[in-house]
Image (tube, rainbow, N blue to C red):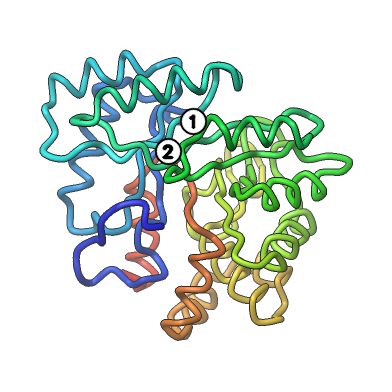
Amino acid sequence: MELTPPGPRGIPPLFARLVDDSALFPPGDAAMPEALRAHFASRESEHAGVLGVFLCQASRLPELITELIKIKPKQPLPLSLIIDTGLGGVPKAISIVESRSELLALRMVEMPAPSDVDEVWLERVSEFVPEDVIRVVEPRRGVGWLDGVRKVIEHGSWPKIRCGGKAGENFPSVDEVADFLAVVSGSSGASFKATNSLHRAVRHADPDTGFVHHGFLNLLVASARSLSGGDVRAALEETDGQVLADEARALSEPAAKAVRELFASYAAASFDEPVADMGELGLL
């Protein structure tokens, strides 16, 4: 299922609609008017084809709708609804979105899983979210985490992997990411989404915090290797952007398509940063 209409010509398939807009979330924490203005400006930009859906918390839907009424968008805003009101709030939130179809097009619903990803909870997720909307569930890392990932996939949802945050423990190790990729790539037809601290293309240490951030290009190349039997951990550890860019460029069109069917999208607080990195590496 395509999340948004095809982007302008010139965007390589490997990067089409890769970056979802999470400007409302940390570390950006943009105000709603500014976040929407920037999003619609990006949709008119040269690299609009890289842009995916706009992320908004269920609790902020009234604010989102108020601002969209002022903006009067030409097309409904492709939306991923982030459930911050508990599973019981999902039907009402979806009803609100569907009642404003001139402003909003619901593409995705994302939510954290309970500590124990049980079958009953996943069944309720399936019941609450319409069939034509992608369900994204984030199992909590820890003991039994990968079993939760498998259960999410078995119920027809995308698992989400959190790649960073405000504390060191929010950053999964290379081994944890590699194990996650092994589970998802080994499940027929499965897709995943990534979030947090992936605004730069290449693995790097943040000079302010010292935290080592995963790169979205590392994750793309690692996904390609996980499908072809290559060295996934080495791809995740690579810090030479040109090495990663060369490998990404060398992927055939079918291989790039398979990679993006696996690694469907990731959320970034900034659209300009990933686009700038891709440009500097000669990928756009």
Task: Give the secondary structure at mark 1.
Answer: loop
Q: Toward which corner of the image does residue 87 lie, by quadrant?
A: top right
Q: Toward which corner of the image does residue 270 lie, by quadrant?
A: top left
Where in the figure is residue 78, as x and y percent of width and height?
Answer: 30, 40
Q: Nearer the viewer, residue 99 or 276?
A: 99
Q: Residue at x 64, y 30 (%)?
A: 124
State whether residue 2 is above or below residue 9.
Answer: above
Where in the figure is residue 77, as x and y percent of width and height?
Answer: 25, 37
Where in the figure is residue 214, as x and y percent of width and height?
Answer: 61, 54
Would you name the residue on which mark 1 appears?
27
Task: Give the secondary structure at mark 2.
Answer: loop
State whether residue 177 is above or below residue 196.
Answer: below
Q: Residue at x 61, y 60 (%)?
A: 190
Tell me whether circle 2 and circle 1 mark residues in contact (CB < 8 Å): yes
Where in the figure is residue 74, as x and y percent of width and height?
Answer: 10, 38
Q: CA distance from mark 2 to mark 1?
A: 7 Å
Q: Residue at x 68, y 60 (%)?
A: 184
Q: Quadrant of the N terminus?
A: bottom left
Does label 2 or label 1 sit earlier along the sequence? 1
Q: Amino acid at mark 1?
A: Pro
Q: How many marks?
A: 2
Is 185 situated left or right of 103 in this image?
Answer: right
Q: Which mark is residue 243?
A: none
State whether residue 204 is above or below residue 142.
Answer: below
Q: Residue at x 58, y 64 (%)?
A: 218
Would you name the residue on which mark 2 appears?
269
Is 78 situated left or right of 25 in this image?
Answer: left
